[in-house]
């Protein structure tokens, strides 16, 4: 069904001038960061309409990152499910192993444009940290990455990869020692070094202009997927599925299809050990409206506003808040949200590896869990695209430990 002008106009009007997606988003940061955010907004506003910037971005995405990524028909997974066709958008084949490189290249180019010589980043699963370290090496920028001590242990391979490319990886030992605390430390660093430093935030979250900017750098995922499925099947897919931590890979896939009412979209959160306090990171299953680390959105918090503990087998989804644009489209009923549990993810991680010869990231496996459930529920004439946002090399040691295997 063709897009109409009305929803397309509404889609591109978000966020508003104050950075809001309906009641979500905005700017909730220390006064010290306001000038840096305003500078970033101005520079990005110029770059997004600058043909030379866009040409350079496309060149690096092609030559350095490896775009376009294939749309792969997962024939054996499809046969196993006995229903709809399952296609995988292979972001796992990008340089550094995940979709994160799209945004890292874009923001590194902005840092160079602003004359910032030092870059900081946060990372959970390590993939954004690796992507940031990679682009900083490429463009000759100093790089500091903050990572929770727990995540450093379960993603030791990525820690070494970052250091190998010249990044300083700083362990964060506060609180739960995961992604939330890493963001806290990165923001403290930015406040202290705001004149010389650009913060490459890794997901579609935070204060304006980050949610919109990160989304735009990842829109290439959905643009390619739409063109590829039309070439392969002659029509649009029936459903799209992607995992949602902050939500960058998901909004990158979904955005180009928002004006296509025939296409159902589902974001999959971390169900952890089950939807009980402290055992999951499914914000839409147990969260409420609040403010955290720069914006207003759905947050896992107690009645007093204290952030609850989270848990996921996946370090990249182990976060208490979700991107504000996701909250907006969830309220509108345009995007649905589900969750997958740790046990489901570990089973599907092994299944995909055996049946397709593709080891998916634990984050991406959350999307596969739901995509396979939907494939079983639908007929063979239907088509599902699952965003395989990253590869699982980084997770092999952790999964082996969980399965009782000795390497």
Image: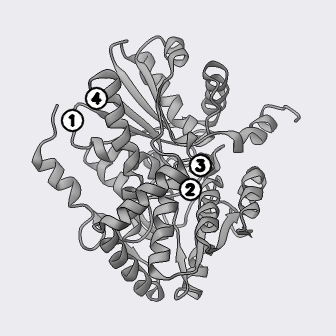
Residue located at (57% from left, 80% from top): 117
Q: Are marks 3 and 4 in contact (CB under 8 Å)?
A: no
Which numbered disc, 4 or 1, marks the residue that appears first in the sequence? Answer: 4
- Is 7 located above or below residue 27 in the figure? above
- Between disc 1 and disc 2, the foreground one is 1
Which numbered disc, 1 or 2, marks the residue that appears first in the sequence? Answer: 1
Q: Nearer the viewer, residue 366 or 53?
A: 53
Dot 2 falls on a residue whose secondary structure is loop
Q: In which quadrant of the rendered view does residue 211 lie? A: bottom left
Q: Distance between the Cα atoms at labels 3 and 4?
A: 28 Å
Residue beneath disc 2: 319
Which numbered disc, 3 or 4, marks the residue that appears first in the sequence? Answer: 3
Which numbered disc, 2 or 3, marks the residue that appears first in the sequence? Answer: 3
Dot 1 falls on a residue whose secondary structure is loop
Q: Nearer the viewer, residue 18 or 253?
A: 253
- Between disc 4 and disc 1, the foreground one is 4
Most extreme residue toward the right is 406
Residue 74 placement (x, y as % from top left): 51, 22
Please tell me how crowded label 3 is: few (under 14), some (14-19), or many (20+) other residues with Cα within 10 Å. many
Residue 379 placement (x, y as % from top left): 36, 12
Most extreme residue toward the left is 5
Residue beneath disc 1: 261
Q: Are marks 4 and 2 in contact (CB under 8 Å)?
A: no
Q: Give the label on residue 277, or none.
A: none
Residue beneath disc 4: 236
Residue located at (32% from left, 27% from top): 231
Residue located at (55% from left, 39% from top): 364
Q: Distance between the Cα atoms at labels 1 and 2?
A: 30 Å
- Between disc 4 and disc 2, the foreground one is 4
Please tell me how crowded label 1 is: few (under 14), some (14-19), or many (20+) other residues with Cα within 10 Å. some
Residue 48 placement (x, y as % from top left): 32, 66
- Between disc 2 and disc 3, the foreground one is 3
């Amino acid at each position: 069904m063709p897009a109409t002008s009305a929803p397309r106009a509404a889609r591109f009007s978000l966020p508003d001038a104050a950075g809001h997606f309906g009641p979500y988003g905005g700017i909730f940061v220390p006064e010290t960061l306001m000038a840096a955010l305003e500078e970033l907004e101005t520079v990005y506003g110029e770059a997004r309409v600058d043909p030379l910037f866009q040409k350079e971005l496309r060149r690096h995405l092609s030559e350095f990152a490896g775009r376009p990524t294939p749309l792969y028909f997962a024939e054996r997974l499809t046969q196993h499910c006995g229903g709809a066709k399952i296609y995988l958008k292979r972001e796992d084949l990008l340089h550094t192993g995940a979709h994160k490189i799209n945004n890292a290249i874009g923001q590194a180019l902005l840092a160079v444009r602003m004359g910032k010589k030092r870059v900081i980043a946060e990372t959970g699963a390590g993939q954004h940290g690796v992507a940031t370290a990679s682009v900083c090496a490429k463009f000759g920028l100093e790089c500091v990455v903050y990572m929770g001590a727990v995540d450093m242990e379960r993603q030791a391979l990525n820690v070494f990869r970052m250091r190998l490319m010249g990044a300083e990886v700083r362990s964060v030992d506060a609180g739960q020692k995961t992604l939330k605390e890493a963001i806290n430390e990165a923001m403290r660093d930015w406040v202290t070094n705001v004149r010389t430093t650009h913060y490459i935030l890794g997901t579609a979250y935070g204060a304006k202009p980050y949610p919109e900017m990160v989304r735009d750098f990842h829109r290439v995922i959905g643009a390619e997927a739409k063109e590829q499925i039309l070439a392969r099947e002659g029509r649009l897919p029936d459903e799209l599925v992607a995992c949602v931590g902050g939500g960058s890979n998901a909004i990158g896939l979904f955005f180009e299809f928002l004006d296509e009412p025939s296409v159902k979209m589902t974001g999959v959160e971390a169900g952890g050990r089950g939807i009980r306090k402290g055992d999951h990171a499914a914000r839409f299953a147990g969260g409420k409206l609040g403010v955290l680390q720069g914006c207003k959105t759905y947050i896992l918090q107690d009645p007093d506003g204290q952030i609850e503990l989270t848990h996921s087998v996946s370090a990249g989804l182990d976060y208490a808040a979700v991107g504000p644009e996701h909250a907006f489209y969830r309220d509108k009923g345009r995007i649905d949200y589900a969750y997958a549990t740790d046990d489901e993810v570990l089973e599907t991680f092994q299944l995909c590896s055996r049946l397709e010869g593709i080891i998916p990231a634990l984050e991406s496996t959350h999307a596969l869990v739901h995509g396979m459930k939907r494939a079983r529920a639908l007929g063979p004439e239907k088509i599902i695209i699952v965003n395989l946002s990253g590869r699982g090399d980084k997770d092999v040691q952790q999964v082996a430990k969980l399965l009782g295997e000795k390497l």
